[in-house]
Amino acid sequence: MNEKVVEALRAAFPNEILVVNEFRGELTVVVNKNKIAQICTFLRDHADFKFDSIRDVCGADYYRPEDRFEVVYNIYSLQHNFRLRLKVRVDESDPHVPSVTSVWTGANWAERETYDMFGIVFDGHPDMRRIYMPEEFAYHPLRKDFPLMGIPGSLPLPRK
């Protein structure tokens, strides 16, 4: 199935597939971030794959000058009992990625969590607001440059 998915993606999106990696039978495909919604729609609707659910959307901070962040999409085909990991790379200077909530509504809260913790904005998301931290909180706690002990005074705490 891995080869079939890669062949179909390369045929449909020849310039958008950046990296293909298979490790211990698990397939990971890094794609152009601007085409993530179209690629997800293709994988959902393709008769041979039917990736009918998104299991998770999360972020990663590699703290490097280019492509600092990655957004990771774990999708699943119930019909074929097959998992696929899609990734997009995101620059710190332009932390925007198209939302996939129009493809799978289950991406809603996971995209909000990734926005809240990493500051990656999902363009086209129906409710892009913070999920854990207050809206006025100016930081993103899972970024590698966020201090481990937090920033004193950055969050008003309740009095005893």
Image (cartoon, grey):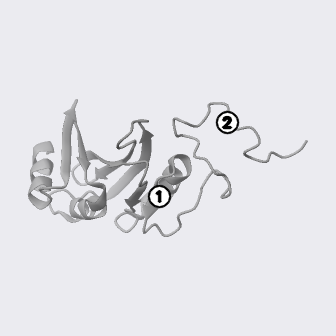
- What residue is pinned by disc 1? 121
Question: Compared with residue 19, is residue 33 higher up or lower down, i.e. above or below?
Answer: below
- Amino acid found under the numbered disc labelled 2: Gly
As drawn, the residue found furthest toward the right would be 160
Q: Which mark is residue 69?
A: none
Which of disc 1 and disc 2 is earlier in sequence? 1
Q: Nearer the viewer, residue 76 or 6?
A: 6
Locate residue 138 relative to residue 127 in the image: left or right.
Answer: right
Locate residue 30 relative to residue 135 in the image: left or right.
Answer: left
Image quadrant occupied by the C terminus: top right
> Dot 2, how many residues are within 10 Å of its Cα: few (below 14), some (14-19), or many (20+)?
few
Number of labelled discs? 2
- Disc 1 element: strand
- Disc 2 element: loop
- What residue is pinned by disc 2? 150
Locate residue 125 relative to residue 19 in the image: left or right.
Answer: right
Question: Compared with residue 54, is residue 123 higher up or lower down, i.e. above or below?
Answer: below
Locate residue 18 relative to residue 145 in the image: left or right.
Answer: left
Image position, residue 67 (x, y; %): 35, 44
Image quadrant occupied by the N terminus: top left
Image position, residue 123 (x, y; %): 42, 65
Q: CA distance from mark 2 to mark 1?
A: 22 Å
Does the image show residue 86? yes
- Amino acid found under the numbered disc labelled 1: Val
User: Residue at (9%, 51%) from the top-left corner?
Assistant: 7
Image position, residue 29 (x, y; %): 23, 45
Q: Nearer the viewer, residue 24 or 95?
A: 95
> Dot 1, how many residues are within 10 Å of its Cα: few (below 14), some (14-19), or many (20+)?
many
Image position, residue 54 (x, y; %): 36, 54
User: Residue at (41%, 55%) from the top-left corner?
Assistant: 94
Does the image show residue 81? no
